[in-house]
Image (cartoon, helix red, strand yellow):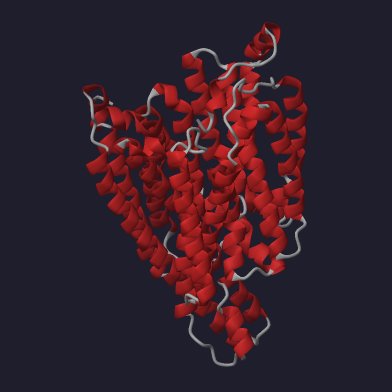
């Protein structure tokens, strides 16, 4: 069981357990603040990308790594950290995660090169994985009442979504008031406060009979995922598949295949993939990965479109995205009502179709240049509402379809699917956008070969080159870069719409209830 320790009891005496129970709502507040911080860090960088690009000068592929190495690291290590917390103590792992998160935040804030920022973001992902795995385990320990525990986990889960959706607004405000590094530096005082409070009120607990920590599975999953994503991004940057890239990509696929085979053979797997043999669990997992991947990727790319093409400042871009954030929360609230009215199967399918239609509309808007904001708002509301319904019901279906005795493994798959969706969404769609941008950006008269090559790296690089040219040539390059990015955004929005549309049909086919009880859900 990947998070088998979450059902354990505190190892201290009955007095300590009683104190922890009395403090359970304070402990929940710490856990929710923790997850809010992790959610914010998933998206807070989005609106600071233009300013960060001017200072750090990342290439197109480096920018994609900066954005999604965080979520990919969390996805790769989340289950591992849950198992580690069972062994060494969840409180110890949580506080250690916060310490690492704080150090990594300060490092990211003052990074001067793209490589430094990528490494710092990876460390942030490690810290976030330690925090996320520990907090859900602590909640399950201190909330002994089933109804209270269900409410607490629901509140805890929503904290991550809230953080992810307000991240762009917070980032925009910080960038306009200070500089791009402030989006990371703001974490440090918050982490210090949580470390002090957490050390005082959090109980220690561990699994008295923890499962073996399978380092081989950890290495296989991390290396395999890194190999596949690296190959995808290299293809997007160079528009060809070299021998080296092909070998690395094939090696990544091979390692991930070996990981899956190993999990099925181990008596105590790191991630119990046998749950995916359940048709409804597998279908709900696919829905969550597709939906959250599309939501996170489009949140990132649309933020860039608002600034590079629409001319919005970072703060205005963050404010412009608030209808998306608000409607996402509304969708989450409406999800149980929709499931009662038409059943979870049709609610998920309909919400996916709504999200797909919204992305298709965004693709049309992006292709025609800056559109009237009222039209954009309607589209964002539809996208956010659909995504909110899918993410809420999808997560519930994953845990509800599993045997109650395997709730820990189902929770692990649920959490991993969200983070994996976020990482792969930016990686895959970002590769397509980068490739489209490089393909359609025309040669501009008056640019040297080196300047043209630099301009093709990313729209940020093109704008930087344009600033060094005469006014007329610079404006021609900026307009061409905006048009190329708009076409790239149109392409990825259309692809995401098609994927979500197909997933909608998949939901109808595979989320059929298997019992009368499920049919009433």
Residue 36 quadrant: top right
Q: Write the residue at 31% across / 58% down.
A: 498
Left/right of residue 29 with respect to residue 413 in the rendered view: right
Q: Write the residue at 36% across / 44% down.
A: 287
Compared to 289, does 343 lie above or below? above
Q: Write the residue at 25% across / 38% down.
A: 346
Residue 366 spot, x, y in % from top left: 41, 66
Compared to 315, does 281 lie above or below? above
Compared to 489, does 91 lie above or below? above
Q: Is residue 310 visible?
A: no
Residue 516 quadrant: top left
Q: Is residue 192 visible?
A: yes
Q: Quadrant of the C terminus?
A: top left
Q: Report the front residue among 15 and 252.
A: 252
Residue 493 quadrant: bottom left
Residue 502 spot, x, y in % from top left: 28, 53
Residue 205 spot, x, y in % from top left: 65, 21
């Amino acid at each position: 069981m990947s998070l088998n320790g979450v059902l354990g009891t505190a190892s201290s005496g009955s007095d300590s357990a009683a104190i922890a129970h009395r403090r359970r709502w304070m402990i929940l507040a710490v856990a929710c603040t923790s997850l809010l911080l992790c959610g914010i860090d998933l998206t807070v960088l989005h609106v600071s990308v233009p300013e960060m690009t001017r200072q750090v000068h990342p290439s197109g592929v480096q920018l994609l790594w900066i954005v999604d190495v965080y979520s990919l690291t969390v996805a790769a290590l989340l289950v591992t950290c849950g198992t580690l917390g069972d062994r060494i103590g969840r409180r110890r792992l949580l506080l250690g995660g916060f310490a690492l998160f704080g150090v990594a935040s300060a490092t990211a804030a003052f990074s001067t090169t793209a490589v430094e920022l990528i490494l710092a973001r990876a460390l942030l992902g490690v810290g976030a994985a330690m925090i996320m795995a520990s907090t859900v385990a602590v909640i399950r320990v201190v909330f002994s009442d089933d109804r209270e525990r269900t409410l607490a986990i629901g509140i805890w889960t929503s904290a991550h979504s809230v953080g992810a959706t307000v991240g762009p607004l917070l980032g925009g405000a910080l960038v306009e008031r200070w500089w791009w590094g402030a989006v990371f530096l703001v974490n440090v005082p918050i982490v210090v406060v949580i470390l002090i409070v957490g050390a005082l009120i959090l109980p220690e607990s561990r699994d008295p009979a923890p499962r073996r920590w399978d380092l081989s599975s950890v290495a296989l999953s991390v290396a395999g995922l890194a190999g596949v994503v690296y190959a995808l991004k290299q293809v997007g940057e160079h528009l060809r598949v070299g021998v080296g890239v092909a070998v690395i990509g094939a090696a990544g696929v091979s390692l991930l295949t070996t990981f899956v085979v190993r999990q099925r053979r181990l008596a105590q797997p790191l991630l119990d993939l046998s749950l995916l043999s359940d048709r409804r669990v597998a279908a709900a997992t696919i829905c969550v990965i597709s939906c959250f991947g599309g939501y996170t990727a489009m949140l990132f790319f649309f933020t860039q479109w608002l600034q590079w093409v629409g001319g919005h400042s970072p703060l205005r871009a963050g404010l412009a995205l608030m209808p998306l954030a608000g409607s996402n929360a509304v969708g989450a609230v409406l999800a149980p009502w929709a499931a009662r009215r038409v059943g979870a199967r049709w609610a998920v399918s309909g919400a996916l179709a709504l999200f797909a239609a919204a992305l298709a509309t965004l693709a049309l808007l992006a292709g025609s240049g800056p559109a009237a904001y009222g039209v954009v708002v309607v589209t964002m509301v539809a996208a956010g509402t659909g995504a909110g319904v899918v993410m809420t019901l999808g997560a519930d279906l994953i845990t509800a379809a599993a045997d109650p005795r395997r709730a820990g493994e189902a929770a692990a798959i649920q959490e991993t699917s969200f983070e994996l969706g976020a990482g792969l969404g930016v990686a895959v769609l970002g590769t397509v956008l980068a490739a489209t941008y490089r393909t359609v950006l025309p040669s501009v008269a008056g640019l040297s070969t080196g300047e043209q090559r630099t301009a093709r790296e990313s729209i940020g690089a093109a704008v930087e080159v344009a600033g060094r040219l005469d006014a007329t040539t610079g404006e021609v390059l900026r307009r061409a870069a905006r048009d190329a990015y708009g076409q790239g955004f149109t392409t990825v929005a259309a692809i995401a719409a098609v994927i979500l549309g197909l997933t909608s049909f998949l939901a109808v086919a595979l989320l059929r209830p298997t019992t009368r009880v499920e049919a009433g859900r």
